[in-house]
Amino acid sequence: LRDSQQLQQSSMGGLLSSLPPLEASMTSPFSVLVCTLCWELLYQTLGLFFQLAAPRLVLRSHSKGYSSMANHGHSYACALIHAVVVTARGLQHLAGLVGAPAEVQMMSPMGPGEPGYELAHPTQLTNLLFFSWLCYDICHIISWYPQLGGADTVAHHVGFAIVSAIHGLTGCLPLPFAWLITTELSSPFLNIRWFLINSGRGDTGMMHATNVAFALSFFLSRVLLYGVGVVHLALHTPHLFSAALRPRLSPYLAAIVCAQILFGYGLNLTWASKIYKMATATRQGGAGRPDEREPLNAADGAPVKTPIKANLSPNQPAMRMAASVRG
């Protein structure tokens, strides 16, 4: 038993020794706390706006949407802002890193004088924005559970929070982080979809265009781009577990990252299958009126069983379209 405890302590010590000092990372506890509070401040500020603006945003013929817009519009607006910001930054990181040497793609250089530092280091700020938003969002999901998201949403957020923390603390895997964060491309359309439904514009041409844009962006980013990223990571697995990365990324952390990325892709494929079935059902005329169709949890694209009509009730908090995970 004593030998087993010593082995566990030794393994944990090796795991922690792979992390650089928190002061050298933008994912320090203080930075995370400040950014998380900034997201909460934005949420509260937008809450005041939607309380006042709800009557003007919602069509008079759709009075049942007033409550949802006033009570939950700020949550979807925060998710929309987050998705747009991190997706734009992710595309910039991806464009710069895709042609970089494998050493830079897998491990961010430590100092400004090292080659590739200007390409990899900016991912740390994006990671801080992403990780702090996950912390803020998980708190809201848990406080409203299960109205704002089910177990799959919680698993998605927690899993990618772990990957985000590993990237922030070690500075490793800047390219995988770049393509993972770019998969948020589909999230803005789901947040726009929520606003259209709850403002009484769920049966308009704009709604149809948003649904098409969501479906295309989901398959482009969360199926195609994510799949290419998984293949690229598999091809660089020897480098991922090499001695060069071991001082900063232990085999334990590398295995955790790989497992979570595969889990996330499996989750995306499951949601993609459900989205395809919903789309084909709609084309065949079996989906019913727009406000009776099976909605999507826009954080991740997962279909939710509760009808949208019920979510518009003042007594039923609206489902939230925020991405995780996101990741």
Image (tube, grey):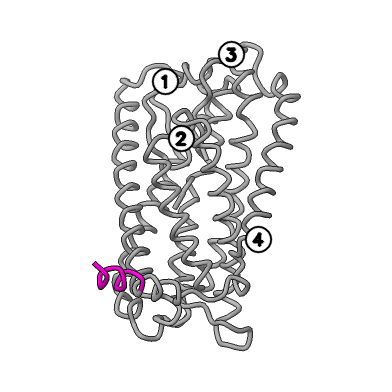
The residue at which mark 1 appears reads as 307
State the residue at coordinates (39%, 81%): 246
Q: Percent position (x, y) of residue 44?
A: 70, 36
State the residue at coordinates (72%, 21%): 56
Question: Relative to residue 7, is residue 246 depicted above or below?
Answer: below
- Mark 1 and mark 4 lie on one chain; the one further toward the N terminus is 4
- Foreground mark, 3 or 4? 4
Q: Is residue 26 magenta?
A: no
Circle 2 packing at 10 Å, graded few (<14), some (14-19), many (20+), is: some
Q: Percent position (x, y) of residue 301?
A: 42, 40
Label 2 secondary element? helix
Label 3 secondary element? loop
- Mark 3 and mark 4 lie on one chain; the one further toward the N terminus is 4
- Real-space Cα distance between discs 1 and 2? 17 Å
- Quadrant containing the N terminus in the rendered view: bottom left
Which residue is more in the foreground, 258 or 73? 258
Identity of the amino acid at label 2?
Answer: Asn
On the image, which quarter does residue 251 sit in? Answer: bottom left
- Mark 2 and mark 3 lie on one chain; the one further toward the N terminus is 3
Residue segment shown in magenta: 1-9
- Real-space Cα distance between discs 2 and 4? 37 Å
Label 1 secondary element? loop
The residue at which mark 2 appears reads as 211
Identity of the amino acid at label 1?
Answer: Pro
